[in-house]
Image (tube, rainbow, N blue to C red):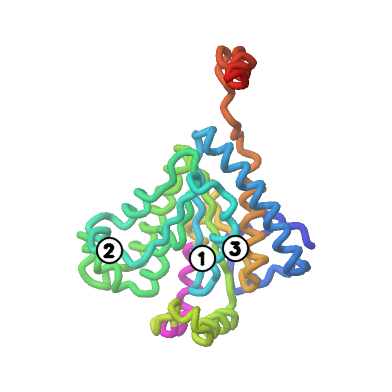
Amino acid sequence: MKKIKSSFYKAKKGVEISTISTNAHLEASEKQLEEKLEKERKKLAKFQNKLYAHAKYSVLICFQGMDTAGKDSLIREVFKDLNARGVVVHSFKTPTSKELKHDYLWRHYIALPERGKFGVFNRTHYENVLVTKVHPTYILNEHLPTVNTLTDIDDDFWEKRYQQLNNFEKNLVENGTIIFKFFLHISKEEQRHRLLRRLNKEEKNWKFSASDIEERKLWDDYQLAYQEAINKTNTAYAPWYIIPSDNKKEARLIVADILYDELKDYDVKEPTLDPKTKANLVNYIKQLENE
């Protein structure tokens, strides 16, 4: 199996996603991929326990990708060994009427992980420069004081929004949140196969919507929106990782490997006992054994 290096998947300056392969070609069997993922999961679980006890950092893991990119199954498989009390997953759908009465970051801010916990965003604050970039009419629903018509949603508007996202993340990092942003990169042909599976398998039908076909027609627009968002918000403190995702098992392993490889270098340790308690450990043990 090829060695996974997190730096290889980290987005470079001026990235063109059309030139990046949607296959990682790790040269491993499905069994090998599953066994390696299990090992990485256990290491992540141990780190998460220390993170919880340390209680000074939180970890925010963001997943974006075209429909059928495999976000749900990846989240299930990568994080299933973590303690349930230490990881919280949020899936962001179309904003509700209440959410639209706040600024667009409000619903993301209130879902952020507490110190000591992992927070996973399945679709993220980046929807506000992705789906809205492809469908700018959605911006009108935000009732912004400076936006009255579509002509007000110009290049300056998007530049400000990218900067707002950068500022949002910078503030989080400076206050103890470790951020990972993953773009699950699939090919248009692979999406076609996955949509067909949804239609052909009765138990998968519920995942399908007629809008999936309409959104697929805008594939090129979405790819450009992703590319611009990644280039505008790929920072040293909150980098993007582009994960080849035509092979789901490879994508899951790569994400898990990157997470542990980057997190293990943080100074996260279990707190030590106070001197008085530590000095009396033998006595406490004897008391319990003699009950």
Q: Position of residue 186 (x, y in %)?
A: 58, 73
Secondary structure at numbered mark 2 = loop
> Could you tell me how far apart the alpha carbons at marks 1 and 2 are, in whole angstroms?
22 Å
Q: Mark 1 is on which residue type? A: Asp
- Mark nearer the N terminus (3 vs 1): 1
Secondary structure at numbered mark 1 = helix
Badge 3 density bin: few <14, some 14–19, many ≥20, Cα 10 Å: many
Q: Residue at x 50, y 45 (%)?
A: 86
Residue 178, label in figure: none
Q: Main secondary structure of the magenta part?
A: helix
Q: Mark 2 is on which residue type? A: Thr
Residue 217 in the magenta stretch? The answer is: yes
Question: What's the magenta region?
Answer: 213-229
User: Which residue is label 1 attached to?
Assistant: 72
User: Which residue is label 3 attached to?
Assistant: 242
Q: Residue at x 20, y 68 (%)?
A: 148
Along the line of sight, which residue is nearer the eye, 195 or 274?
A: 274
Residue 96, label in figure: 2
Q: Mark 3 is on which residue type? A: Ile
Discs 1/2, front: 1
- Mark nearer the N terminus (1 vs 2): 1
Q: Position of residue 54 (x, y in %)?
A: 54, 33
Residue 26 in the magenta stretch? The answer is: no
